[in-house]
Image (cartoon, rainbow, N blue to C red):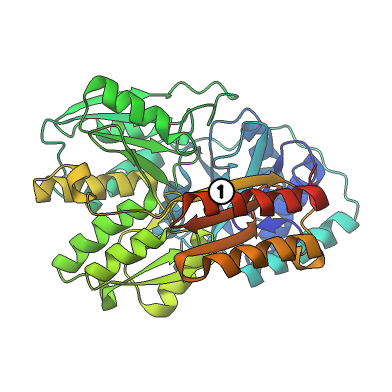
Amino acid sequence: MRKMFGTDGIRAVAGEAPLDKRTVYAVGKALAHSLGKNPRVVMGMDTRESGPWIAATLAAGLRAGGSTVESAGVITTPAIAFLTRKHGFSAGVVISASHNPWRDNGIKVFGGDGYKLPDAVELGIEAEIERVLAQGEEFAHDDALPAVNEVYRAEYVRSLLDAVPNISLDNRSVVIDCANGAASAVAPELFAGLKGTVEVTHASPNGRNINDHCGATHPEVVAAETKRLGASIGFTFDGDADRAMFSDEHGNVVNGDAVMLVCARDLQARGELAGDMVVATTMSNMGLEAAFKRSGISMLRAPVGDKYVLEEMRASGASLGGEQSGHILFPAKSTTGDGLLTALLLLDVVHRSGKTLGELIADLKNFPQVILNVKVREKKPLDDFPSVVYAIGAAEEELKDSGRVVIRYSGTEALARVMIEAESEEAMTRHAEAIAGAIRAELGI
């Protein structure tokens, strides 16, 4: 069982295990050892104030393990995946905690092929980290970061524009919320030349304002701004910009489910939707499944986590997949979720269709859905608690074919997530609160 790696790398409060200096150094050294002879690693980070010291400590460990290290500076997670693959690095590392608050940080690793590491590889690295820590090595370094190669950011921006030829805003006005995160360093340059009016918001990071009432975890913010300005569309990214949420021209939030529907229909019309199927997750709404069915598209469900969606896509041969939270995967274009790429591709569909985003998703009718997050002190199997088992069973029995019950632990935070969909909003709310209450009574903080 993995102890450090969650669904998206190692994540914790910066300065606390496993993101204390000693462990971060061991992570670097262990990663270098796992990469073979004379490895090369490229590194990037988001805008958290802890990023520089974590990057410097990790780089010291990598060098101690025999690796050379290069830096792309503040840059998005998918940019590191792209650069790793393009330049033949042995691995790419991102210092980011994605959508988490500024006090948290994390370490994400891509293999030399630009894909996130499989669970089995992460387990092997964990074992090596424990071995390095057991040696009790004292380390000292000067906190010097590798020099930033500014060319890398320009290469990434160029790759995005090349991926969507002839992209244009068609003189539309758009609102972009950068979450005071990594997109702040890329998005303004990317959208500047697209023949439209671009309003950039939350692009002034100070180390502590990343995701703070902005970004993809607060899509209502860009939606309100889109409506206020009378803009055509709004985009909002999370801290490391590997996912995006949107707003239509009416100021309605448009999530990953709706984006998958728009893109799937477009790919299908062009004969590019492999097998007429899409891979979503257990969290995607039943309304999306119904909309796909009307278009002759089947929907597979993978566990939550974009790496697991991608694993199912590679196994099934699907050409599109994603999560309700805004991670959208276009394997023909990128090896990982990329919020900026998703924004460009969605814009391209709007451009070619001659329709607004609101018009393109007008027939998507979602079942009422609620997600309750319960803070927990530990992630014990829920089957161990009869009261929780009873509450879940009661919900499943009543809802049957008229709803869904999905209970899971977050892979990145100390949370139990209770998701219920139902035709009856009353039943949905009642069962969600009953299950959340049972979990809170047994495991709550």
Q: Is residue 303 above or below residue 58?
A: below
Q: Is residue 146 above or below residue 441?
A: above
In the image, farthest residue toward the left: 354
Q: Please provide percent x and percent y for residue 7.
A: 61, 58
Q: Is residue 288 left or right of 140 when viewed as pictured?
A: left
Q: Please provide percent x and percent y for residue 373.
A: 63, 45
**Measuring 64% from the left and 48% from the top, which residue is drawn there?**
433
Q: Please provide percent x and percent y for residue 102.
A: 62, 31
Quadrant of the rendered structure where residue 118 is? Answer: bottom right
Quadrant of the rendered structure where residue 185 is? Answer: top left
**Measuring 27% from the left and 72% from the top, which residue is drawn there?**
297
On the rendered image, what quadrant is the C terminus found in?
top right
Which residue is nearer to you in this view: 365 or 128? 365
Q: Please provide percent x and percent y for residue 335.
A: 41, 61
Which residue is labeled 1 in the image?
429
How many numbered tags mark residues here?
A: 1
Which residue is nearer to you in this view: 387 or 360? 387
Q: Amino acid at mark 1?
A: Thr
